[in-house]
Image (spheres, rainbow, N blue to C red):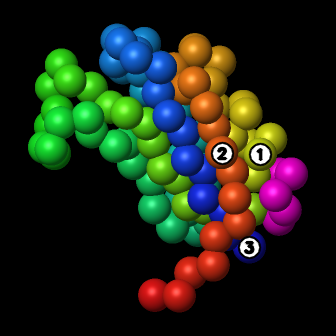
Amino acid sequence: MLYVIYAEDNKDSLEKRLSVRAAHLARLQILKDEDRLLTAGPMPIADSEEPGHAGFSGSVIIAEFSSLDNAQTWANDDPYVAAGIYQTVTVRPFKRVF
């Protein structure tokens, strides 16, 4: 089943975000390599593809997991969580229509 992981960043977390980005992306690459990743990406604060110093307000990941518990565990183990970048992380089932 698909699950959406919606995370909101703490304010002024861009520097921390950039410092652990490689580890965050490595975990996403594993999901992609397993053909379980539908989409993933950050939400820029500025209305721009490259928000610069404005940074990001959070992230969205939609991926396949065997259960809500497994999706939640995966989300909780994200390097962005460990680094204190995310202030909240919400995991919900997702039904793809298109």
Contact flag, marks 2 and 3 (Cβ < 8 Å):
no
Snapshot quadrant of residue 33: bottom right
Q: Residues within 10 Å of mark 3 (few under 14, many from 20)?
A: some
Q: Which residue is mark 1?
A: 72
In the image, the segment drawn in magenta is 66-70
Looking at numbered disc 3 in the image, what kind of residue is underneath it?
Answer: Met
Up-down: is 39 above or below 6? below
Along the viewing direction, whichever of 92 and 80 lies nearer the viewer = 92
Give the number of the disc on residue 52.
none
Give the number of the disc on residue 90.
2
Up-down: is 23 above or below 62? above
Q: Earlier in the sequence, mark 2 or mark 3?
A: 3
Up-down: is 64 above or below 97? above
Q: Which residue is mark 3?
A: 1
Expressed as whole percent of the image width and height from the top left, the position of residue 83 reads: 58, 14
Snapshot quadrant of residue 15: top left
Disc 1 versus disc 3: distance between alpha carbons? 13 Å
Residue 34 visible to the viewer: no
